[in-house]
Amino acid sequence: MKNINQYLLGATFLLALIAMRPQWNSYSGQTSLDEKKTHRIVFHVTTPDTAAYRALSRQIVHVLEHWPSAQIEVVAHNKGIGMLEKKKSNVADRITALTAQGVRFVACEQTMKIQKLEKSDILPDAGFVERGIVHVVERQEEGWAYIKAGF
């Protein structure tokens, strides 16, 4: 009888351990708890490279495929402001589509001032921040993940 009780106790303990283990996602190796976490990502673009703009828009799509509820901002300043300029952007249609999915694109007003750009020169889907670098730092201080866009 003592052996049966020890066996049952051991089996119960083993089942309890199995029940408490994280539920692993077979594809990514991440737990299902990760899917419930709010992911906040700020992308920082400073390059005039239009290939980087296309790559960034694809990267954002991939993030949203994995985490559909992720909060994403793209901060464009310095030479990266071209991504949001009506005359220079090669991803305006993608920006419109991503904005519709909740992605926020913002242009640095300080950069615009230096480059003599008006708000009317910027894509209508974009917002504005006074200083791009300050905004990126504030987002990082709030716990947002930081990704430098470009190659």
Image (cartoon, grey):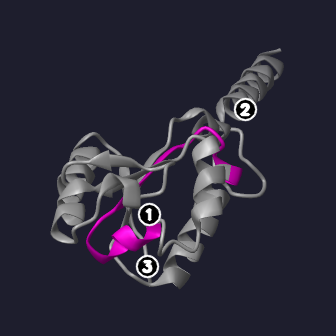
In the foreground, 50 or 60: 50
Mark 3 or 1, nearer chain start: 1
Q: Which mark is residue 14?
A: 2
Q: Position of residue 24 (x, y in %)?
A: 71, 46
What residue do we see at 63% from left, 42% from top? Answer: 100
Check residue 52 for magenta coloring.
no
In terms of image quadrants, where is residue 102? top right
Q: Is residue 68 located in the magenta-colored stretch of the structure?
A: yes
| 130 left or right of 42 in image | left
Q: Amino acid at mark 1?
A: Leu
Q: CA distance from mark 2 to mark 3?
A: 49 Å
Given residues 134 and 131, the one toward you in this image is 131
Q: Nearer the viewer, residue 97 or 4?
A: 97
Task: Assess disc 2: are there few (<14), some (14-19) or many (≥20) residues with their C-alpha within 10 Å of its C-alpha.
Answer: few
**Considering only order in the chain, which callout, 3 or 2, is on the residue closer to the N terminus?**
2
Gap between marks 3 and 1 measured at Cα: 15 Å
Q: Which residues are magenta?
A: 65-83
Identify the secondary structure beneath mark 2: helix
Query: Which class describes the residues within 10 Å of circle 1: few (<14), some (14-19), or many (20+)?
Result: many
Q: Which residue lies at the image location 19% right of the left edge and 54% below the top edge?
A: 131
Looking at the rendered image, the quarter that the N terminus falls into is top right
Instruction: Specify few, some or many for label 3: CA neighbours under 10 Å numbering under 14, 14-19, or 20 or more.
Output: some
The residue beneath circle 1 is: 84
> Along the horizontal axis of the image, is 37 left or right of 115?
right
Q: Who comes first in sequence, dot 2 or dot 1?
A: 2
Residue 150 — which label? 3
Q: Would you place residue 66 above or below residue 21 in this image?
A: below
